[in-house]
Structure formats: C-alpha cells, structure tokens
Image: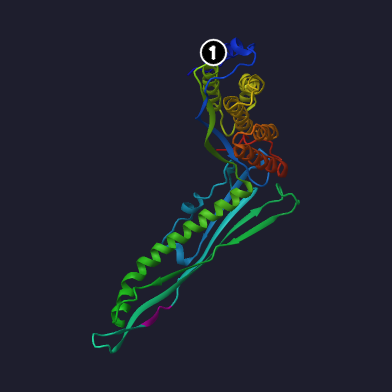
Amino acid sequence: MNLKITIGYFVILFLSFKSFSQVKPQKVDLDKFSFNVNYQILPKKFVPLEKRTFSSEAIINKDFVSFYPNKETLNGRINVYGWKKSVRYSNIDVEINLKSFTMGEPKLESRIDESKDKNGVMVKTTYYFVIAKIEAKGSGVVKIKSAISDSGKDEENTYAFDEDYIYKSNNDNVNPEAVKELFKKQKDDFYNEKIKTYVELVLNQTNRKVNKMYGLEATSYRDNLWIIDSKDEEGAIQKEALEAVKVIFSKMTATSPIDGIVSEMSPLIEYFDSLKTKYTENDKSSKKIRYSAYYNLGRIYIHLDQPEKAIKEGEGLIANDYDKKDGQRIIDDANYDLEVFKSTAFKSKHNPAFY
C-alpha cells in the first residue's frame, strides 16, 4: 500500500468528520490490530559511534586443540552488536580462555536392593554403576580500554565459566566388570559431547555479558493496537488510521533516526486524541472507543521513544475505567524506557550502529 495514498485518504476522512459534535456510538466491539516495529535493545553503557570498535582473542589450551584447531573459528563467534570488529586491542577486547576439560578417575559404586522372594525370605541384590566427573575450567575476559572508560583508566571484568559434567551409568547391572566395559565404550562419546556443550556455554555467556554492557542489538517486535468494530463512520475512519499506522511503522529501522516517522504520525495522533472528547458519555460503547484512543496512543508513543507521553496515556486509560490493567502495563513499559534513558546517554532506541 502506497504511504502517501494511505495517509492522504485518512486525512480526507478525518477532516470530513472532524467537525461532527459528540455522537452516540452504535454497538462497539474491539478487535486486535497487529503491526511490527524495529528497534535496539539498549546496553547499560553508552559509547559514541566513532569509538565502537572491538577485538577478540581465543586462547585454546591442550584439552581443546583437537576439537578447535583453528582459533578463528571461535573468534568469529564473538560479536558486539552495533560495533565494528578491528585489530586487537581495540576499545573493547574480548578474550576467551579455554583452560582445561578433564575427566577424573571413574569410581565403581554400588547399591543394594532388598526384596522378599515367594517364600518370604529377604534377598539382597547388589547393583553396580560407574560415576565419572568432568571438570571444565575457563573464563571470558572483557577488557575495556581507557578510550571509553568512565574512570579514564583501563577496566577489566573477568567472568569464570566453571562447570561439572557427571557421567553415570545405569544402576541396574549386577556385573561390575560389564559396567566397567560399558564405561570404556561410552566415555569418549560423553566427553566429546560435553566439551562441545561447554564451549557453546562459554561463547554464549561471553556474548551475553559483553552485549548487555555495550551491545546495540537490533530486534523486531510484533505489537497490537485496538480497532473498533463498528458499522458507523468512525469504524471506517479508524480502520484507515490503523492501516496508516502500520505502514508508517513498517518504515522504521533500528539504526535510523525516527524524526520523519514522528512527523508522519502526527495526523494519526491528532485523530486518536480527538476521540477522547468526541465520545464523552459514560456508556460502555463510548468507554471502549476512548479506551482504544488511550491505548493506541500509549503504544504509539512508546515506539516513538516518547515514554513521558505514553505514561500520560496510560494514566488516562486507567481513569477511563475500562480494562485498567492495560493502562498500568503501558506505564510500566514507559517507565522501563525512561530508566534506561536516564541511566545512559541514549535518548532513543534507534541509533546509528555498525552492522
């Protein structure tokens, strides 16, 4: 659908009915109207675009060499979202040190099962099983150079990823030698499987920690507005309004300014605002229409990075006394964005980045 046609047609409809005085709405139902938005998950710390370079280094010790002979295989898995990868030691240096992955000596253990035979005599049966523990040692080191450090000094955060993996054979074998032989056959497969599991853990946890602190991960979200299902003129106008909202938000990208989108959304915001004073009766249909106005504006303002305005809409939705919980959810979402904006230098969830 062409954006100019959609907005233009909506404005014509809106202006045609704008001068109407308050009307008594017909029976009104509310239906969900879905749309998509793109934005960034903001990190804890703000770093200017020109300083967003990072490097990585994987240190592979002897236990891991046969599985990962080329360290670049692991280096390629380290990513700081929105940052440009560069030579070592960049503004952020991520070092993964895979230290050791060793299986201890297996232990043959047993359990005794007691039961009565058909004559009531207590019979004891000994079952054997093998237990062996793998101790995995490693750390992901994130080094932050003074170029971006708040303190002006080098910072270093070390995260140790130590895990234990336990091999335990079935404990229903009465033959201890058979249990030992089974362990010999299974131990290599168990070891190989767990070393890969461990490396994935280290990679995922390292990426998660460094991105929580510095990364700008682009993401998308499917949200809902409420559209009134009504046979009168208002139903037709709102249908066009929400279609226009959907088209405008489809242009949103995580890494582009949204000033143009805010501007294009202006007549639609004016329309939803008008519903609050157009339908002032206390009947259920009027409340539903006002509810759709407050709710839709609240969600729109959140996605336009205007949480203060979203909070006002959430408060209005609560005062409207129709599904107050939705008003509180809007306020909670807006307060979350406000806290992020206050604790960092970010003012938007749409910022330039390297991808």
* Residue at the outermost left position: 118
Q: Residue 233 versus residue 86: which sits nearer the camera?
A: 233
Horizontal placement of 284 versus 319: left or right?
left
* Location of residue 320 in the rendering, given as x and y in whole percent from the top left corner: 65, 31
Q: Is residue 317 above or below residue 202?
A: above
Which quadrant holds residue 158? bottom right
Q: Residue at x 45, y 73 (%)?
A: 133
Is residue 108 part of the magenta span, yes or no? yes
Whether residue 128 appears in magenta in the rendering, the answer is no
Q: Which residues are magenta?
A: 105-111
| Identity of the residue drawn at 61% across and 52% down | 93
Amino acid type at image mark 1: Tyr
Q: Quadrant of residue 332?
A: top right
Q: Nearer the viewer, residue 276 or 139?
A: 276
Residue that extends furthest to the bottom in the rendered view of this protein = 121
Give the position of the C terminus as an image quadrant: top right
Report if residue 89 is visible in the image: no
Q: Is residue 217 above or below residue 140?
A: above
Secondary structure under tag 1 reads: helix
Mark 1 highlights which residue?
A: 9
